[in-house]
Amino acid sequence: MQHITILGSTGSIGVSTLDVVARHPDRYRVHALTAQNKVEELAAQCAQFHPHVAVVGSAEAAQKLQVLLRGLGLQTQVEYGPAALCAVASAPECDCVMAAIVGGAGLAPTLAAARAGKKILLANKEALVMSGPLLMEAVAASGAILMPIDSEHNAIFQCMPAAFHQQQRTPAQHGIEKILLTASGGPFLNRALDTLDQVTCAEAIAHPKWVMGRKISVDSATMMNKGLEVIEAHWLFGVPADRIEVVIHPQSVVHSMVSYIDGSVLAQLGNPDMRTPIAHAMAYPERIASGVAPIDLIKIAQLTFEHPDLLRFPCLKLAYDALQAGGSAPAIMNAANEIAVQAFLDGRIGFRAIDQLIARVMAALPSSPVTDIDTVFEQDRRARDTAASFI
Ligand code: NAD
Ligand code: MG
């Protein structure tokens, strides 16, 4: 029996995770569930999954949740705030942590889980982008296990040789030539370039293939999501930036590929439903049912691939630049992106201002070396303040 903490249980990934948990009551128990402020949803999840602890974002939300839970006759312990998130992520009663908080807010609890040696199911890519070397070091030092949930990285994990996950050898020593990271291209792949600044929030979050939270949906529209994923792949698999190639694949059937020096290209295929990577990572090295139907190749009939256009998607280039610059550059870029995306969602800036704002913040704040996590949080805060002042 595995005891799981789900950070961000009311989000898109959180709900998909609970769907998989509910299919396997013989394998999984929920230790803790967390949400920022959706207390009604969280109370309903508590009634179904009976966690020991529920964590919310504020004292006010905690009070509301407490009332709802007592009304349901539940004894779930209610906590709030960032320290409580770190506590449930590192609690001795929990074996496995689904890191599915969106954005930089997920870094501290993910790091707490890594330091406590947990099995981490990593959806929160921003945490790895902000602090790649430090998070990977914490995982190695404690013996934690890091399983990628992002569909592309989970696909790459599945296309890597089993020995790669057990040995300390480099990808090149395993004959891996490059990673082909697939991208749908999002809602604006074919939209006239001169109309991009007029796109509405509703258009930007209407992803053609995936149903996701609002922030990652906007990231998919700008392709910053793919940029974050290039950095994520670099840290997860130790592959240099020039061996990670982004390939546009609008059908979203091939979730990514690994190319070997003997000419073999291994791909993982499936319907665009996050329950597949979630179930894979939860049960690895076993396989369990996820509720996702296998793909119907005859119905799909055609798979197409093309190069990304960096004029259309400047955020992708900014991410390669940040990875190349190293140090605090990815954390600065990530923070600027979070502020820009929120401003776009709030209707305060246009769509094209997102990439312009990130580029300005990156130019204003040069990269500096990152040796400890406090520096990361400091750089993150500076970049957020700078981005806010530019808006
Ligand atoms: P979402 O917006 O649907 O859910 C986010 C969750 O985090 C919610 O439970 C929310 O309450 C919680 N949260 C938000 N802000 C918080 C804060 N400041 N402190 C504590 N909790 C907070 O997002 P999502 O789509 O589920 O994405 C979650 C993460 O997974 C993101 O990092 C995203 O990039 C990654 N991811 C998502 C998908 C997907 O299909 N949705 C795919 C790959 C990766
Ligand atoms: Mg992805």
Image (cartoon, helix red, strand yellow):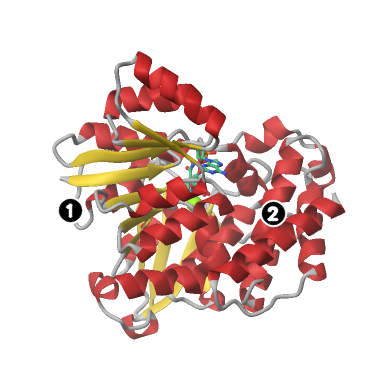
- Looking at the image, is 186 positioned above or below residue 316? above
> Which quadrant is the N terminus positioned in?
top left
* Callout 1 crowding tier (Cα within 10 Å): few <14, some 14–19, many ≥20: few
Q: Give the number of callouts.
A: 2
Q: Could you tell me the amino acid type at mark 2?
A: Asn
Q: Which residue is mark 1?
A: 286
Q: Is there any visible trace of residue 197 in the rendered image? A: yes
* Callout 2 crowding tier (Cα within 10 Å): few <14, some 14–19, many ≥20: many
Question: Measuring 79% from the left and 35% from the top, which residue is drawn there?
Answer: 347
Identify which residue, 117 or 152, lies in the foreground.
Answer: 117
Question: Measuring 44% from the left and 56% from the top, which residue is drawn there?
Answer: 110
Label 1's element? loop
Instruction: Compare marks 2 and 1 and give the one earlier in the sequence.
Output: 1
- Rendered location of residue 204, percent (x, y): 68, 38
Question: Measuring 55% from the left and 35% from the top, which residue is drawn there?
Answer: 58
Is the C-beta of the residue carrying label 2 under 8 Å from the nearest atom of ligand 1?
A: no
- Rendered location of residue 105, percent (x, y): 55, 50
- The quadrant holding residue 246 is bottom right
Relative side of 388 to 64, left or right: right
Identify which residue, 212 or 172, lies in the foreground.
Answer: 212
Q: Which residue is mark 2?
A: 337
